[in-house]
Amino acid sequence: MLGQKERLNRFLKEIIDEAQEKRDEIIGELRQLRRDELASAKADAQRLCEERVALEEKRALTAQLGELEQEKEKLRRLLAVKREEVARSVIALAREKILAAGEAADALLARSLTDVCSRFEGQNFIVYVREKDMAKAQEILPENTQLRCDTDIELGGFRLECGSVFVDDTLDTRLQQEFDGVMERISLPILT
């Protein structure tokens, strides 16, 4: 009987040892699973933090970009105003010089009227000049030419009508064309 009891005790001890080994193995697997899950959770948390930081940086950069675009538009408008101021200053200076030219302006008017008379010789035409140039124009134009005063002509030159042909050879128009040219030349694409 003692032999059977010993065998039974040995058998039970083996079962208990096996159960303890199995328990230790399960506890080890659980601990490893917990470490793996913790590492995965830490990695996910790190990734989420990095994504959050990146999102915040992107929002900040987007806001800065919007502010830069607004500033760029302000500068573009200011530049356009300054360009026009420069062009108007140049044209105003030219206007002053033209008004001060006196004899040179008279000579230019004489050459222009002589040239146009030769082109329209034998035809009836109307010439418009500023009041100051009426006497000079009467000296140059043929007698059958209608001469009229045009108060819109400030700087000199003339306008001519001959049937359906209209010629504008005023210094006012030339100066406006120069102004337009100056505006075009100084309209460089600086802030694109």
Image (cartoon, rainbow, N blue to C red):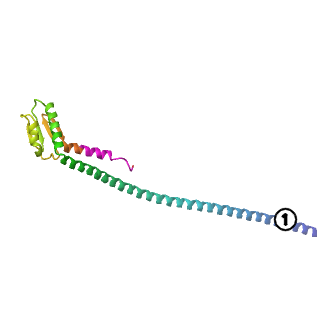
**SS category of the residue bearing label 1:** helix
26 left or right of 108 in image: right
Q: Residue at x 82, y 67 (%)?
A: 16
Asked whether the viewer can see residue 175, the reply is yes
Q: Which of 34 and 53 lies nearest the eye of the viewer?
A: 53
69 left or right of 154 in image: right
Q: Is residue 74 above or below residue 12?
A: above
Residue assigned mark 1 = 14
The furthest residue to the right: 2
Q: Position of residue 169 (x, y in %)?
A: 18, 39
Q: Residue at x 79, y 66 (%)?
A: 20
* Callout 1 amino acid: Glu
191 left or right of 40 in image: left
Residue 13: quarter of image: bottom right
Q: Position of residue 121 (x, y in %)?
A: 12, 30
- Number of residues whose C-alpha sits closer than 10 Å to that of mark 1, classed few (under 14), some (14–19) or many (20 or more): few
Q: Residue at x 24, y 43 (%)?
A: 177
In the picture, which quadrant includes the N terminus? bottom right
65 left or right of 134 in image: right
Query: What span is in magenta?
Result: 177-191
Q: How many marks?
A: 1
Q: Is residue 123 above or below residue 176?
A: above
Q: Residue at x 8, y 34 (%)?
A: 142
Q: Is residue 35 above or below residue 144?
A: below
